[in-house]
């Protein structure tokens, strides 16, 4: 039963990604992003895919909350904050990977699969650092594509949320 609830939450996360661009204010978009990340994290948990992607969605929630505070206070995210989150994505992604059920040290298909969300998160953070909007979109698109492949391989309905995110970036 938990599996089906998790897959339903993946579809609700897709709905969040679909309506996200229609919000008029940045704080509304950020709340929507927080909701989508929370739903995807619950999706991973309930379908039994506990690993780097689950951990990275939790980090993304914290990052979005900090961005929400900056938006409300009308302040800018500092470079130090960006670097801290880049480090958090890498370190906590690896922690999620090595604590995943069934983790075996060494090179394996499962370990390479768990690296995909970490690589995607790093590409997204690089895109955040880049000032040129088109180049930044390319990094964000790479993140969406990596997560789409990852979600397809693990068999989650959250794959549709990542396809929507990728499609939005092609505009």
Image (cartoon, grey):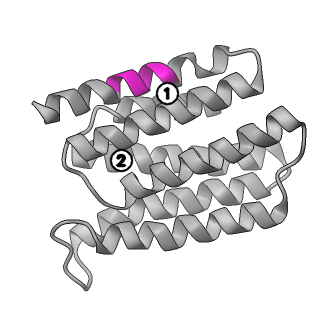
- In the picture provided, is 110 more to the left or to the right than 61? left
Which residue was labeled with disc 2? Answer: 149
Tell me the quarter of the picture where residue 95 sits.
bottom left
Secondary structure of residue under mark 1: helix
Prevailing SS of the magenta stretch: helix
Residue 59 image point, x, y percent: 53, 54
Q: Image point 50% across, 63% down: which residue?
A: 119
- Pointer 1: residues within 10 angstroms few (<14), some, or many (20+)? some
**Residue 98 versus residue 155: which sits nearer the camera?**
98
**Residue 23 versus residue 140: which sits nearer the camera?**
23
Are the residues flagged by discs 2 and 1 in contact, CB closer than 8 Å? no
The magenta-colored residue range is 11-16
- In the picture provided, is 3 more to the left or to the right than 32? left
Which residue was labeled with disc 1? Answer: 164
In the image, is residue 95 above or below residue 72?
A: below
Give the label on residue 155, or none. none
Q: Which is more N-terminal, label 1 or label 2? A: 2
């Amino acid at each position: 039963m938990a599996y089906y609830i998790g897959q339903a939450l993946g579809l609700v996360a897709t709905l969040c990604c679909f309506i996200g661009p229609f919000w008029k204010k940045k704080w509304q978009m950020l709340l929507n992003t927080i909701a989508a990340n929370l739903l995807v994290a619950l999706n991973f948990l309930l379908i039994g895919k506990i690993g780097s992607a689950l951990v990275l969605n939790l980090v993304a929630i914290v990052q979005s909350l900090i961005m929400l505070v900056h938006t409300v206070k009308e302040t800018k995210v500092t470079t130090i904050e960006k670097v801290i989150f880049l480090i958090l994505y890498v370190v906590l992604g690896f922690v999620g990977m090595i604590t995943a059920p069934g983790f075996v040290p060494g090179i394996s298909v499962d370990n390479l699969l768990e690296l995909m969300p970490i690589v995607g998160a790093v590409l997204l953070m690089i895109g955040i650092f880049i000032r040129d909007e088109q180049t930044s979109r390319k990094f964000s698109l790479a993140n969406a594509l990596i997560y789409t492949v990852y979600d397809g391989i693990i068999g989650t309905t959250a794959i549709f949320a990542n396809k929507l995110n990728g499609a939005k970036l092609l505009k």
